[in-house]
Amino acid sequence: MARGSRRQVSCVYIFRKCWIEEVALGVEASMKAFIWVAKRRSFEFPRGFLERTRERGKIVEWAPQVQVLGHRAVGLFITHCGWNSTGEFVYGGAYALLTHLW
């Protein structure tokens, strides 16, 4: 994904792990671009997920969250409701799906 090349509100930003298989399959079915912040060793994605979503998804161990959430392409932020994350998505103006089950 080239920087700034996405339409407004056209991708999903996922932070940490939560119901990995369900979230991964939902993101895949949505056909939306995504950035998923996750330490790869902390869990495994469903078989074939990485290959099937390679063209529109990016999985990283760290991202500059304030800058990502402030990007016009981010349409949804799935987060654990931590104080920093909450302040950052409010500041960035992103919609968020809040869950406390990490």
Image (tube, helix red, strand yellow):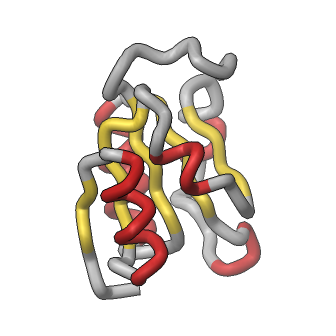
Residue drawn at x 35%, y 60% is 78
Residue drawn at x 41%, y 82% is 82
Closer to the camera, 69 or 34?
69
Number of numbered labels in the structure image: 0
**Outermost residue, bottom direction?**
101
Closer to the camera, 93 or 39?
93
Closer to the camera, 41 or 14?
14
Q: Horizontally, is 54 left or right of 92 in the view?
A: right
Residue drawn at x 31%, y 58% is 90
Residue 2, given in percent of the width and then of the height, sits at 68, 17
Residue 64, given in percent of the width and then of the height, sits at 67, 53
Q: Is residue 24 above or below residue 98?
A: above
Residue 63, given in percent of the width and then of the height, sits at 68, 54
Closer to the camera, 34 or 70?
70
Q: Horizontally, is 53 left or right of 40 in the view?
A: left
**Outermost residue, front direction?**
91
Residue drawn at x 64%, y 41% is 58
The quarter of the image holding the N terminus is top right
Q: Is residue 45 above or below residue 58?
A: below
The quarter of the image holding the C terminus is bottom left
Q: Horizontally, is 53 left or right of 33 in the view?
A: right
- What is the quadrant of residue 68 in the picture? top right
Q: Is residue 11 above or below residue 26?
A: above
- What is the quadrant of residue 31 in the picture? top left
